């Protein structure tokens, strides 16, 4: 079957869905394909309505400066079609989901992430791509994943029945699909406790919460888990627990206490010593941090190098929590290494050598740090999309994780007696939150003022709250509009009155 024939049959399925006055989810393998497929469908639909015009405008203006992606989504929504993936802003995904539930949007083209957790009124699921690129090249997706997609069709709350349709290019592929996904068995599920970062995080949490107070308690707890059932070797699990406890003690997150209240070292306590969290270890558990991440942050903060905003951002970026990193493409390798020379003195840990196995992953984390650094230097979403191929939704998701890591960094510094770093960490966190240079932070204390309006004010010589008090509301309206000008004038007046009363 030619590509055109495949497209024709696919569009016929979509039109048949619309003719039945039903809704469909179309699953594809990449974000770019989801967007392009939605555009192809929208081009084949002539009708639009007034309500969808309003929804389109709302979607386009979620960001102060709409990106090309915002405009693409807004355009297809006018025809009752949408795309949905992790690169969208959360608000845009929410609008698309709500309008689909209301029946206004009829077709959503999406990546497999929509197959998990959401309950939508899709009578029909059309799976256009059952292969994708991975570590083994272009390969079939897992049977379990395909069956998750099938399960989105005909949800009991919305329909009495549903249809899941896979598109094959020829008879041979149709037979393969039948064998793999209809008659095939789903893959086994494996416990995430087998992953080391999860294991050490749970281990510290159990100790911190007082659920397990001895090594024997920990072995008994883990022996009852699904992981132990799959692993089957309790002796090996005991050995792993002992090794990890030694690490947690070395990092000063736990300590051992004998029955006589005297503290001793870990390897003397096989006879029933009590394991206690240190204040530092308890806080790490409360922050839901991987103990290895906490250890690396603490080590970085203790280096003798001068600390900068980039230092703190890079320290928090070089963690498991922010993976997957942006990948350094072959054509930009030299450029990234040149940037590394500029920032080398600000990196708070040992940089791997170019011949080290971990060097490429380090460069990926460094590139991700550069993304954040550009963000706090007021590159907008469209510029970052062009420069790093990072969609607004992906950027916001990573910024949210970075904010959590920066908060954790502040808490660890405070507990470890590094009060000299708290102002720098707080300032970095604020700049990451708003995506601004330091000079705008004073103006951002005003409600309703974000990075765009703050920069507009600063460029018009309104640089502090005192400047806002001095300028007339009439002049402020010319810069920000009537409603915003009135709002911030009221705010600074209220702040001044409060200050005078005090």
Image (cartoon, helix red, strand yellow):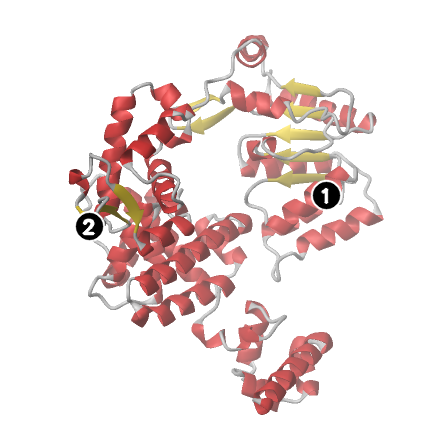
Query: Alpha carbon of mark 2 to alpha carbon of mark 1: how far?
Result: 60 Å
Q: Circle 1 sits in a helix, a strand or a loop, which is it?
A: helix
| Quarter the N terminus occupies | top right
Classify 64 as above or below 129.
below
Q: Position of residue 271 (x, y in %)?
A: 20, 34
- Farthest front residue in view: 260
Query: Disc 1 marks which residue?
Result: 98
Q: Quadrant of residue 356?
A: top left
Q: Nearer the viewer, residue 159 or 354?
A: 159
Label 2 crowd (10 A; few <14 / some 14-19 / many >=20)? few
Q: Nearer the viewer, residue 267 or 382?
A: 267
Classify 315 as above or below 195.
below
Left/right of residue 322 with respect to residue 79 in the rendered view: left
Q: Position of residue 320 (x, y in %)?
A: 36, 44
- Regarding residue 129, the answer to whether it shows in the image is yes
Label 1 crowd (10 A; few <14 / some 14-19 / many >=20)? some
Q: Circle 2 sits in a helix, a strand or a loop, which is it?
A: loop
The label on residue 262 is 2
Q: Nearer the viewer, residue 56 or 4?
A: 56
- Regarding residue 326, the answer to whether it shows in the image is no
Q: Nearer the viewer, residue 214 or 364?
A: 214
Q: Earlier in the sequence, mark 2 or mark 1?
A: 1
Q: Position of residue 54 (x, y in %)?
A: 78, 52
């Amino acid at each position: 079957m030619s590509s055109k024939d495949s497209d024709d049959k696919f569009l016929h399925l979509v039109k048949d869905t619309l003719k039945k006055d039903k809704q469909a989810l179309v699953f594809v393998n990449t974000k770019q394909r989801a967007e392009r497929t939605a555009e192809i469908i929208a081009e084949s639909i002539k009708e639009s309505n007034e309500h969808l015009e309003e929804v389109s405008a709302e979607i386009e203006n979620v960001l102060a400066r709409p990106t090309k992606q915002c405009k693409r989504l807004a355009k297809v929504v006018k025809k009752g079609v949408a795309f949905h993936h992790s690169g969208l802003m959360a608000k845009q995904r929410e609008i698309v989901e709500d309008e689909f539930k209301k029946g206004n949007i009829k077709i959503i083209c999406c990546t497999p992430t929509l197959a998990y957790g959401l309950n939508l009124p899709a009578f029909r699921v059309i799976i256009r791509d059952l292969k994708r690129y991975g570590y083994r090249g272009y390969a079939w997706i897992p049977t379990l994943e395909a069956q998750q997609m099938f399960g989105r069709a005909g949800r009991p709350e919305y329909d009495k029945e549903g249809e899941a349709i896979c598109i094959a290019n020829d008879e041979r592929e149709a037979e393969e699909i039948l064998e793999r996904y209809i008659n095939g068995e789903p893959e086994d599920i494996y416990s995430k406790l087998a992953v080391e970062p999860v294991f050490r995080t749970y281990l510290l949490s159990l100790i911190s919460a007082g659920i397990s107070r001895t090594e024997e308690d920990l072995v008994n707890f883990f022996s009852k888990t699904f992981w132990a059932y799959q692993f089957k070797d309790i002796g090996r699990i005991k050995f792993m627990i002992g090794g990890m406890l030694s690490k947690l003690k070395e990092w000063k997150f736990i300590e051992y206490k004998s029955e006589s209240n005297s503290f001793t070292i870990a390897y003397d306590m096989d006879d029933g010593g009590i394991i206690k969290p240190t204040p530092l270890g308890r806080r790490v558990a409360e922050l839901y941090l991987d103990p290895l991440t906490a250890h690396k942050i603490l080590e970085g903060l203790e280096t003798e190098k001068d600390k900068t905003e980039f230092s703190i951002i890079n320290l928090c970026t070089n963690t498991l929590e922010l993976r997957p990193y942006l990948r350094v493409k072959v054509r930009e390798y030299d450029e990234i290494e040149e940037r590394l020379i500029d920032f080398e003195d600000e990196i708070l840990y040992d940089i791997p050598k170019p011949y080290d196995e971990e060097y490429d992953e380090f460069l990926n984390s460094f590139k991700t740090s550069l993304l954040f650094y550009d963000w706090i230097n007021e590159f907008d979403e469209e510029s970052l999309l062009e420069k790093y191929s990072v969609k607004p939704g992906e950027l916001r998701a990573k910024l949210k994780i970075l904010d959590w890591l920066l908060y954790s960094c502040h808490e660890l510094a405070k507990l470890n007696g590094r009060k000299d770093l708290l102002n720098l960490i707080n300032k970095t966190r604020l700049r990451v939150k708003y995506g601004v240079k330091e000079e705008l932070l004073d103006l951002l204390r005003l409600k309703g003022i974000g990075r765009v309006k703050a920069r507009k004010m600063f460029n018009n010589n309104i640089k502090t709250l005192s400047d806002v008090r001095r300028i007339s509301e009439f002049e402020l309206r010319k810069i920000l509009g009537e409603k915003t000008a009135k709002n911030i004038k009221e705010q600074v007046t209220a702040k001044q009155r409060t200050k005078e009363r005090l």
